[in-house]
């Protein structure tokens, strides 16, 4: 028999508070790192450069990128977020809006929304995803909408033909980044982009975590973080 005593409710609550503080600290560090990285990115961009903001949401990153004078292609499939993004884009003639998701091939796909979308669309729209199985995603809701999807590979190739290179690619697309990044590695597409940054969502998709780990290992072996950074926020 074990002599270990059961934890008291007070101890359990203390451990939960400590874990919450540690998560908040880690999140704040990632955010600070992303802001510093964004400052460095913007310092290298010039008019004539072409950048892609995939998963632009309401336009926070698009706005910052647009101030550099670079041409910003912003992709956002969620109709609500796209409406907010359009308000931001009105102030810039160098922003090109795409009311579409990005994927490995062109077509149409269903966009699923968070379970609390109706209660708080401002914060919930950032969770909208085309990937099933995500935490806090309502896959059967009437809130799901059909959206256009463009082939990110065709789009990058078109930019390369016209401009020589994609100067910066930011990807925050709620799980859909996994297949895209896997194929970018396989097709050597990262070489067509000066810097790629992505937020990966393995915490949201439990079943996909082994593939995310394999992706991270493969990318880190093939490219330095100054070329491909998978720790965007």
Image: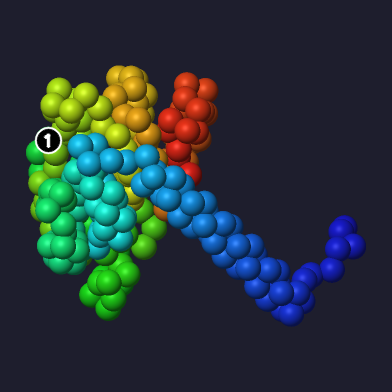
Residue located 24% across and 37% down the image: 49
Q: Which quarter of the picture shows residue 212?
A: top left
How are the residues colored? rainbow
Residue located 52% across and 57% down the image: 32
Image coordinates of residue 24 in percent, x first then y, are 57, 65
* 189 lies left or right of 35: left
Quarter holding the N terminus is bottom right
Image coordinates of residue 175 in percent, x first then y, are 34, 46
Q: Is residue 16 above or below residue 151?
A: below
Q: Which quarter of the picture shows residue 215?
A: top left
Residue count near mark 1 (Cα–Cα under 10 Å), binned few <14, some 14–19, many ≥20: some
Q: Secondary structure at mark 1?
A: loop
Q: Is residue 215 visible?
A: no
Residue located 48% across and 44% down the image: 231
Q: Is residue 226 above or below residue 173?
A: above
Q: Is residue 61 above or below residue 109?
A: below
Image coordinates of residue 107 in percent, x first then y, are 9, 38
Q: How many marks?
A: 1
Would you name the residue on which mark 1 appears?
106
Q: Is residue 226 visible?
A: yes
Q: Is residue 6 above or below residue 34?
A: below
Image coordinates of residue 117 in percent, x first then y, are 26, 70
Residue located 23% across and 57% down the image: 112
The residue at the far right in this view is: 3
């Amino acid at each position: 028999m074990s002599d270990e005593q059961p934890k008291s409710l007070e101890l359990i609550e203390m451990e939960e508070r400590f874990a919450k503080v540690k998560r908040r600290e880690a999140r704040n560090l990632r955010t600070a790192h992303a802001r510093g990285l964004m400052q460095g990115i913007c310092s290298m961009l010039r008019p004539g450069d072409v950048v892609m903001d995939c998963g632009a949401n309401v336009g926070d990153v698009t706005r910052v990128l647009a101030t550099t004078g670079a041409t910003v292609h912003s992709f956002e499939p969620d109709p609500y977020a796209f409406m907010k993004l359009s308000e931001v884009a009105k102030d810039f003639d160098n922003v090109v809006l795409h009311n579409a998701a990005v994927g490995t091939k062109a077509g149409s796909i269903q966009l699923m929304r968070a379970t609390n979308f109706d209660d708080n669309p401002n914060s919930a729209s950032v969770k909208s995803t085309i990937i099933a199985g995500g935490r806090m995603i309502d896959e059967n809701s009437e809130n799901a909408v059909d959206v256009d999807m463009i082939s990110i590979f065709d789009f990058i190739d078109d930019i390369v033909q016209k401009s020589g290179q994609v100067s910066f690619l930011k990807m925050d697309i709620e799980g859909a980044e996994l297949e895209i990044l896997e194929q970018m590695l396989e097709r050597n597409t990262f070489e067509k982009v000066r810097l790629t940054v992505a937020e990966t969502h393995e915490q949201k998709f439990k079943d996909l975590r082994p593939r995310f780990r394999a992706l991270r290992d493969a990318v880190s072996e093939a490219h330095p973080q100054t070329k491909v950074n998978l720790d965007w926020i």
